[in-house]
Image (cartoon, grey):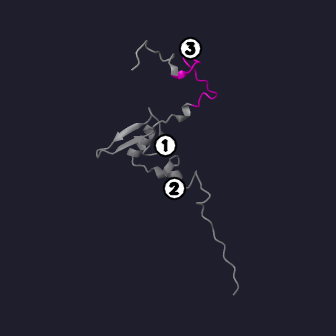
Amino acid sequence: REEGPPRSHFGSSHLGSACLGLAPPRCVLSDPWALSAAMVIKTDLCAYTEYRIYPGRGQRFVAKDGKISFFISSKADSLFHQRIKPVKLRWTQAWRRMNKKGKVDELSKKRTRKAQKFQK
């Protein structure tokens, strides 16, 4: 280790000659949200509706067998415990998947084949 007076963070040599130890270096961003785009938020999926549950939301249920279920709302929790199938409710993702709503891929659409004409 070097001997001598202790260096402060702002006056250290790795920052270059532009910083004289008077003020901390500043980062000027043209887009203030540029740094927040890299932030990752851990989300869970609702066991009933399959909606994303953000931190601080939802309700956790632990069954007798130890299986953990996350619900986005008390409505989803109640319907799950009444054993109402999510496929029967139009607002759930299971219903949308069953009835082919939402994302439609061009390649996965079923194409009808034309009958081939040929000489007898």
User: Looking at the image, do the residues carrying marks 1 and 3 touch, with CB atoms under 8 Å apart?
Assistant: no
Q: For residue 79, what is the image quadrant?
A: top left
Query: The residue under label 2 is which amino acid type?
Result: Met
Question: In the rendered image of this protein, does residue 44 appear above or below residue 21?
Answer: below
In terms of sequence position, does the residue under pointer 1 or pointer 3 come before the other? 3
What SS does tag 1 mark? Answer: loop
Choose between 56 and 78: the one closer to the eye.
56
In terms of sequence position, does the residue under pointer 3 or pointer 2 come before the other? 3
Q: Residue at x 46, y 49 (%)?
A: 86
Residue 120, how many percent across, how many down? Answer: 69, 87
**Closer to the camera: disc 3 or disc 2?**
3
Question: In the rendered image of this protein, does residue 110 appear above or below residue 2?
Answer: below
Residue at mark 1: 51
Decide whether residue 16 is among the magenta residues.
yes
Q: Residue at x 53, y 51 (%)?
A: 96
Locate the N terminus and report the quarter of the image it occupies.
Answer: top left
Residue at mark 2: 98
In terms of sequence position, does the residue under pointer 1 or pointer 2 come before the other? 1
Question: In the rendered image of this protein, does residue 30 appear above or below residue 4?
Answer: below
Residue 59, how many percent across, how many down? Answer: 40, 37
Query: The residue under label 3 is which amino acid type?
Result: Leu
Q: Main secondary structure of the magenta part?
A: loop
**Closer to the camera: disc 1 or disc 3?**
3
Residue at mark 3: 20
